[in-house]
Image (cartoon, rainbow, N blue to C red):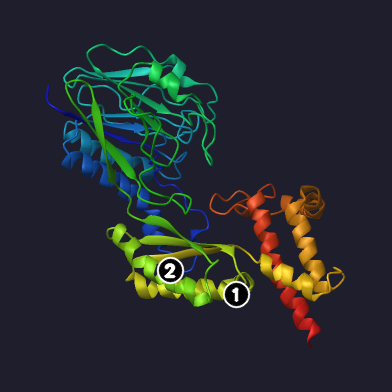
């Protein structure tokens, strides 16, 4: 038997909505909104050009129930292109497109052998491709919140075949992902399969040790927001006669998200950060290989400049936006600025200057901010008056997946407190010198 190829993808999230995108100045809205469709087209193009023997999708083909039938029609069109090339396709449903979630459907073309594209949700289903010597074992999600371990129902491997387990799972858990169909890598290893094609976690990662059966998250094929940075795509397996596989990652994304992290500790002036950003941008654009680049700037570190960054964050954001336009050649878009810096030396200087009594306005501000940062009980008392107001905020603020405002988010609260200090000090100082 010659080398066989299998394309493993997951988390297409076709036509996924991008919340609050229009609120960002200069955002290429139309291009980003069509990105998941174009990434799927890229995937089918790759499968055909690489002459793969089989394509598997490990859940979340759709982002949820369709708003319009054009979402489903786009997939039907792309699947038909693949099947015209006699390349079979096997898909399982995940939490976003579980059987109970989808109220609309369209007839799907069958595989070349007559089998259905989507695996059953009642029990573990199989697709056996005798000519390829490949057996697929998988189960679709019957409902959105599957909290039981679906892998327990997967059967023993079929002898003399390459056995591939197709599973939508959080494994032992991952930040930012619901804990669905949890299981341990050791359990999957014990099944005796030759490869586990996983979906649900949007970062590409390998969850096995050297010499073990590959347990692989391919990640999603298109980053949808700033939480999904870097190259996104699929993996193509090359399988030899001994049922051993080697995988190659192929990027499919059409818009790439990236973060510029900068520590201001050693900066002498604000321009040091701006110059560092200007130097960083060309390399990132080169790495993006012609894709538009959406960039967030995160500032951290301790410096006297922290006061300036908080007070003039809007001006700095526009300076960064201008540099992205100048240096990006039309391919860079500045998404947002996040300041997470501290100014500990300034706090100490204020206390010393204000006689150490803590009674002056400036020293009092510093002492209160420090107490709130350090003491959760103090912080909770401060939060109590906000909770009623919080309950009245619109969902797009409190539940938005890009930058949710959550009172239980310790990092967010810490940043608010850090940003409040220079603003209050500046106001007090301005009043005192009038």
Q: Would you place residue 275 above or below residue 199 in this image?
A: below
Q: Is residue 171 left or right of residue 430?
A: left
**Where's residue 139, x and y in %?**
40, 22
Q: Is residue 301 visible?
A: yes
Q: Which quarter of the figure has residue 362?
A: bottom right
Q: Which quarter of the figure has residue 151?
A: top left
**Label 1 residue SS:** loop
Q: Would you place residue 272 above or below residue 225 in this image?
A: below
Q: Nearer the viewer, residue 139 or 335?
A: 335
Identity of the residue drawn at 40% across and 16% down: 190
**Where's residue 166, x and y in %?**
36, 26
Q: Count neighbours of disc 1 (C-alpha within 10 A) and say few if under 14, some if 14 to 19, many if 20 or more.
A: few
Q: Nearer the viewer, residue 61 or 278?
A: 278
Say the numbered circle drawn on residue 312. Answer: 1
Q: Which residue is mark 2?
A: 277
Identity of the residue drawn at 44% across and 47% down: 16
**Where's residue 345, x and y in %?**
67, 68
**Where's residue 140, x and y in %?**
42, 25
Determine whether label 1 and label 2 are within 8 Å by CB: no
Q: Would you place residue 20 above or below residue 83 in this image?
A: below
Q: Is residue 22 left or right of residue 235?
A: right
Q: Is residue 290 left or right of residue 62?
A: left
Q: Nearer the viewer, residue 126 or 420?
A: 420
Identity of the residue drawn at 73% across and 68% down: 348
Q: Which image quarter is the C terminus in?
A: bottom right
């Amino acid at each position: 038997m010659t080398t066989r190829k299998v394309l493993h993808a997951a988390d297409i999230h076709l036509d996924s909505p991008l919340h609050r995108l229009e609120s960002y100045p200069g955002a290429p809205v139309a291009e980003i909104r069509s990105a998941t469709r174009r990434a799927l087209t890229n995937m089918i193009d790759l499968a055909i050009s690489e002459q793969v023997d089989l394509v598997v999708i490990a859940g979340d083909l759709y982002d949820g129930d369709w708003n319009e039938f054009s979402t489903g029609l786009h997939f039907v069109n792309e699947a038909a292109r693949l099947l015209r090339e006699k390349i079979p396709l096997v898909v399982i449903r995940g939490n976003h497109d579980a059987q109970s979630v989808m109220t609309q459907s369209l007839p799907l073309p069958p595989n070349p052998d007559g089998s259905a594209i989507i695996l059953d949700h009642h029990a573990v289903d199989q697709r056996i491709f005798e000519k390829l010597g490949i057996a697929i074992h998988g189960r679709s999600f019957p409902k959105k919140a599957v909290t039981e371990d679906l892998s327990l129902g997967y059967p023993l491997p079929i002898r003399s075949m390459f056995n591939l387990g197709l599973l939508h799972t959080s494994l032992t858990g991952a930040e930012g992902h619901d804990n669905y169909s949890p299981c341990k890598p050791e359990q999957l290893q014990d099944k005796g399969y030759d490869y586990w094609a996983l979906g649900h976690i949007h970062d590409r990662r390998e969850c096995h040790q050297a010499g073990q059966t590959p347990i692989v998250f391919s990640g999603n094929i298109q980053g949808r927001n700033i939480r999904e940075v870097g190259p996104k795509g699929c993996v193509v397996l090359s399988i030899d006669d001994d049922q051993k596989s080697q995988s190659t990652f192929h990027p499919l994304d059409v818009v790439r998200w990236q973060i510029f992290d900068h520590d201001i500790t050693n900066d002498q002036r604000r321009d040091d950060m701006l110059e560092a950003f200007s130097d960083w941008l060309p390399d990132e654009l080169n790495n993006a290989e012609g894709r538009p680049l959406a960039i967030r700037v995160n500032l951290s570190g301790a410096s006297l400049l922290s006061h300036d960054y908080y007070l003039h964050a809007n001006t700095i954001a526009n300076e960064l936006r201008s540099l992205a336009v100048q240096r990006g050649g039309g391919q860079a878009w500045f998404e947002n600025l996040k300041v997470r810096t501290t100014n500990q030396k300034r706090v100490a200087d204020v206390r010393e200057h204000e006689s150490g009594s803590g009674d002056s306005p400036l020293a009092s501000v510093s002492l209160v901010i420090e107490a709130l940062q350090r003491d959760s009980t103090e912080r909770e008392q401060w939060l109590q008056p906000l909770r009623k107001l919080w309950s009245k905020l619109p969902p797009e603020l409190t539940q938005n997946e890009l930058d949710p405002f959550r009172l239980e988010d310790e990092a967010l609260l810490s940043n608010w407190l850090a940003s409040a200090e220079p603003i209050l000090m500046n106001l007090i100082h301005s009043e005192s010198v009038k």
